[in-house]
Image: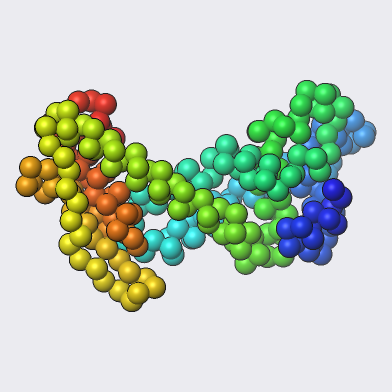
Amino acid sequence: MDLASFQRRHGMRFNDAGLLRQALTHRSWPHEQGGTGALAGNYERLEFLGDAVLAFAVTRMLYERFPDMPEGELTRLRSALVRSETLADLATELELGPLLRLGRGEEQNGGRQRRSILGDAFEALLGAIFIDRGQGAAEDFVATLLGPLVDDLLEADLLDARSRLQELSQSALFATPVYETLSESGPDHQKQFTVAVRILDEELGTGRGNSKQAAAQAAARDALQLLSREGRLPESGSE
């Protein structure tokens, strides 16, 4: 797949195709071509920029999508979205590996599959989009690729928090958590739910979210934190 096909497949259109090529050039390639290596057309400066653009774009996306989510939850979600493993997976999905320009040594050492290189190339690509097409295009790119991952992360965490609370409460307190929706507010397309979790008729946690599942997730985590602070659960149940 060449760069033109790559752009068509992913709905991109660079004004400066040289920026796209630079975003996909590992420092080993210009070094072998007689360049200085560090600055001769490789992706490192674009990666530096893309890292900052990614952090801002994800922060803004989460801030606007979850208006009632506490800072700690937002930070935790952002960290999961921008981790190097996630970026490498996205680079693989975009098929960046075959497009990379690598030196012979890096090529022979499996550089096209190396996850650190793939993650760096993803950030460099984002930096190139920011320079070539502006902040709006960069944020749209982030929202398209990382937005769907948010629900997966929340769902996985929901299962983890609720099952963990149930397991620990049954073993330590011999009781099963009960969840209750306390309130619903907002228009149908922007509903906000408040959910409480009780164990043995004692309310131990509350949470809010844009779905009952997300609110229950927050309530379960709130209860785990309380029970851990009070020493009422084994250490394995602490946050």
Instruction: Specify the color scheme.
Output: rainbow
Residue 169, horizontal then vertical, whole percent: 17, 34
Q: Residue furthest bottom?
A: 187
Q: Residue furthest right?
A: 34
Task: Please say whether residue 39 is visible from this viewpoint.
Answer: no
Residue 60, horizontal then vertical, whole percent: 49, 60
Task: Please say whether residue 216 is visible from this viewpoint.
Answer: yes
Q: Residue at x 28, y 35 (%)?
A: 164
Residue 139, horizontal then vertical, whole percent: 59, 61
Image quadrant where residue 76 sits: top left
Name the side, left or right, on which 227 lies relative to 22. Answer: left
Q: Residue furthest left?
A: 201
Q: Residue at x 83, y 60 (%)?
A: 16
Q: Residue at x 80, y 54 (%)?
A: 6
All told, the count of numbered labels is 0
Is the C terminus in the top left, top right, bottom left or bottom right quadrant?
top left
Image quadrant where residue 111 sits: top right
Vertical relation: 111 (above or below) 74: above
Name the side, left or right, on which 132 lies relative to 72. Answer: right
Vertical relation: 187 (above or below) 170: below
Residue 199, horizontal then vertical, whole percent: 12, 43
Residue in front for this viewpoint, 73 or 204: 204
Image quadrant where residue 109 sits: top right
Q: Residue at x 76, y 57 (%)?
A: 9
Name the side, left or right, on which 207 lies relative to 19. Answer: left
